[in-house]
Structure formats: C-alpha cells, structure tokens
Image (tube, rainbow, N blue to C red):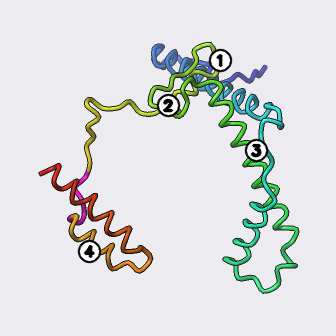
C-alpha cells in the first residue's frame, strides 16, 4: 500500500537528526510568521472605512490630468474605463495605506518620534519592530561619505540656476559660510 506523507514528517536514515529537527523548527517558525503577517493584513483591512477620509475629487482630477498629459494620448475618450479602473485602484491603495498608518499609530507608542516603542500587548508586536526608527548613534555622530563638490562650487552652481531667486542664494551662501566657519 502507498501513503503520502509530507517531507517534514519524514526523516531518512542517513539524515542528521539535528539538521532534520532544525529544518522542521525553521519551517514551523516561518509558517507561523507568514500566518501572523496574513493576520496583520486582515486586521488592517478589517479597520472601519470611516477612519479614512475619502480622496478629494480635486486629487482624482489632478491624477487624471497628469496621467493624460504625460501619456500624450490623442483621444482620451478611448481610455475612460481604464482611467476609472486606475483611479479606483489608487483609492483602494490610499484607503489601505491610511488604515495601515492608523494601525501603526495605535500599536506603536510615540509613532513618528525617535522614542517610538512597540506596544508589547499587541499580538502583532513581532512584526512592528521594522517600523521603528533606527537608534541614534553615540553623540548623534554618523558616518558619511565625502562631499562630491566643495561648498564654494555648490554655491557657484546655485547662483547660475535661473529657478532660484537671488534672495534664496544670499541666504544659502550665508548659511554655508557660517557652517564653514563653524567647522574650521
């Protein structure tokens, strides 16, 4: 007779028992993590719709105008149903992202601050650590790459830019000058 068994229920004679046990435990942990992620997604989606304000008509119209302008279509009437579908998808993603933001705000104390912490009483706390800010280094000093250009060249380049007014350049130069004085 034949019986089908799952691979995790079968250890071959030549297989190392410790490796087998480790593989089984790893699979179970990954499965539990995936199930927790799915439960978290379901929890986010189950949030009431009234916590999210609807997308304003002006925003939708702006999406449509920008999309049509950048696509250079000749007859936009041929794309009305596609545009409606895309706007509906944008709205669904917007609602989901706002629900997600609300859930994170509820489950992470001090969300958006350097001192944010995950509420330990949440069943989703193992997933929320990724949304916490990175710890501030000692004395808030961070490694950085050397500048590509010296400050004087950056300022000279900014002065040549026609989109930036002289007042902005004057303030920029004053700030850079003070910064240069402070570090020297």
Q: Residues within 10 Å of mark 2 (few under 14, many from 20)?
A: some
Q: Residue furthest left?
A: 184
Going from N to C along the chain, the mark reached first, 4 or 3, is 3
Q: Is residue 11 left or right of residue 53?
A: left
* Magenta residues (range): 145-150
Label disc, if present, on residue 55 of the rendered structure:
none
**140 over 145 or under it: above or below:** above
- Give residue 124's quadrant in the image: top right
Q: Is disc 2 placed on a helix, strand or loop?
A: loop
Instruction: Name the mark nearer the viewer: 1 or 3.
Output: 3
- Residue at left offset 44%, top offset 76%: 163
The residue to which callout 4 is attached is 156
Answer with left or right where residue 50 lies relative to residue 134.
Answer: right
- For marks 1 and 2, the one nearer the N-term is 1
Foreground label between 1 and 2: 2
Q: Are marks 3 and 2 in contact (CB under 8 Å)?
A: no
| Disc 4 + disc 3, Cβ < 8 Å | no
Front residue of 160 and 73: 160
Q: Which residue is mark 2?
A: 132
Determine the CA span between mark 1 and mark 4: 55 Å
Q: Label 3: which residue?
A: 95
User: Is the residue under label 4 in contact with that under label 2 (CB below 8 Å)?
Assistant: no
Q: Residue tagged by mark 1? A: 123
User: Looking at the picture, how far across and down is residue 19, in whole percent?
Assistant: 46, 19
Q: CA distance from mark 4 to mark 3?
A: 45 Å
Residue 25 drawn at (x, y percent)? 55, 17
In this view, the mark in front (1 or 4): 4
Magenta includes 149? yes
Q: Position of residue 137 (x, y in %)?
A: 30, 32
Mark 1 Cα-neighbour bin, 10 Å: few <14, some 14–19, many ≥20: few
Which image quarter: residue 11? top right
């Amino acid at each position: 007779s034949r019986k089908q068994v799952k691979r995790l229920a079968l250890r071959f004679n030549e297989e190392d028992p410790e490796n087998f046990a480790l593989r089984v435990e790893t699979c179970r942990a990954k499965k539990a993590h995936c199930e927790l992620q799915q439960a978290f997604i379901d929890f986010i989606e189950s949030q009431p719709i009234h916590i999210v304000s609807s997308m304003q008509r002006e925003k939708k119209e702006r999406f449509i105008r920008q999309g049509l302008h950048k696509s250079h279509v000749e007859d936009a009437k041929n794309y009305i149903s596609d545009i409606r579908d895309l706007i509906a998808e944008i709205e669904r993603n917007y609602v989901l992202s706002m629900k997600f933001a609300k859930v994170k705000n509820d489950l992470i104390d001090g969300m958006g601050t350097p001192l944010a912490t995950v509420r330990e009483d949440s069943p989703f706390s193992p997933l929320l650590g990724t949304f916490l800010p990175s710890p501030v280094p000692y004395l808030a000093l961070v490694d950085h790459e050397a500048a590509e250009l010296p400050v004087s060249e950056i300022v000279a380049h900014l002065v040549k830019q026609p989109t930036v007014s002289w007042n902005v350049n004057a303030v920029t130069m004053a700030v850079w000058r003070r910064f240069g004085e402070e570090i020297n």
